Image: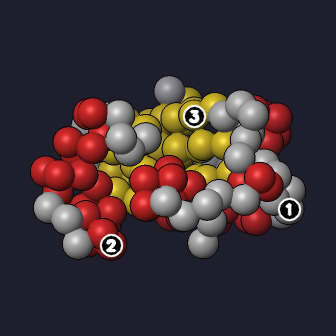
Amino acid sequence: MGNDMYSVEQVAELLGLHVRTVRGYIRAGRLRAVRIGKQYRIARADLDALTGRPASPATVAAAEVSSIVQLDGVDRTAADRLATLVLAGVNTHHDPDRPLRVQTVHDEERHRMKIVILGDVAATADLLRLVDAVLGGDNGLLAGEGADRG
């Protein structure tokens, strides 16, 4: 549960606050959040910091990177396969000192998929190499399905 990412609405519900109050905390700098498009995502460690729960030294990263991979021309089947592969790649990364948080979103109307990765620089780079290898060339996961990397 330490790698969870929450929406503003989820944080408000967990803390028994109004959504506007949580957004105010973010704007004021009291609650750290990552903005993805028009939405905020709050890491469990940042929520714990707000509520005063002590973070163990193993969950504090020296450097963190956020990456968004956008893939155009991806149908639901390919998005599901890619999401499964990416999440399997994350689950095989067993370094508790460098956790990865990953979310995948598929916009069926636009045939677009986004993969949001937050975490350690090296672990994120490894996951991005995996995604690149899977998508690469004519033999990639999405070959023949018209996917263009964005």
Residue drawn at (77%, 52%) of the image? 57
How far is mark 1 from mark 3, CA to CA?
Answer: 19 Å
Q: Nearer the viewer, residue 135 or 53?
A: 53
Q: Which residue is mark 2?
A: 14
Q: Which residue is mark 3?
A: 66
Residue drawn at (53%, 45%) of the image? 115
Q: Nearer the viewer, residue 67 or 96?
A: 96
Q: Please tell me in which quadrant of the rendered image residue 33 appears.
A: top left
The quadrant in which the N terminus is found is bottom right
Residue drawn at (27%, 33%) of the image? 28
**Mark 2 crowd level (few <14, some 14–19, many ≥20, 10 Å Cα):** few
**Mark 1 crowd level (few <14, some 14–19, many ≥20, 10 Å Cα):** few
Q: Label 1: state its secondary structure.
A: loop
How far is mark 2 from mark 1, CA to CA?
Answer: 28 Å
User: Mark 2 against mark 1, which lies toward the viewer?
Assistant: 2
Query: Please, what is the three-letter code of the amino acid marked with disc 1?
Result: His
Q: Label 3: state its secondary structure.
A: strand
Quick check: 58 left or right of 55? right
Quick check: 130 left or right of 141? right
**Mark 3 crowd level (few <14, some 14–19, many ≥20, 10 Å Cα):** some
Q: Which labelled disc corresponds to residue 94?
A: 1
Vertical comparison of 23 with 91: above or below: above
Q: Please tell me in which quadrant of the rendered image residue 38 appears.
A: top left
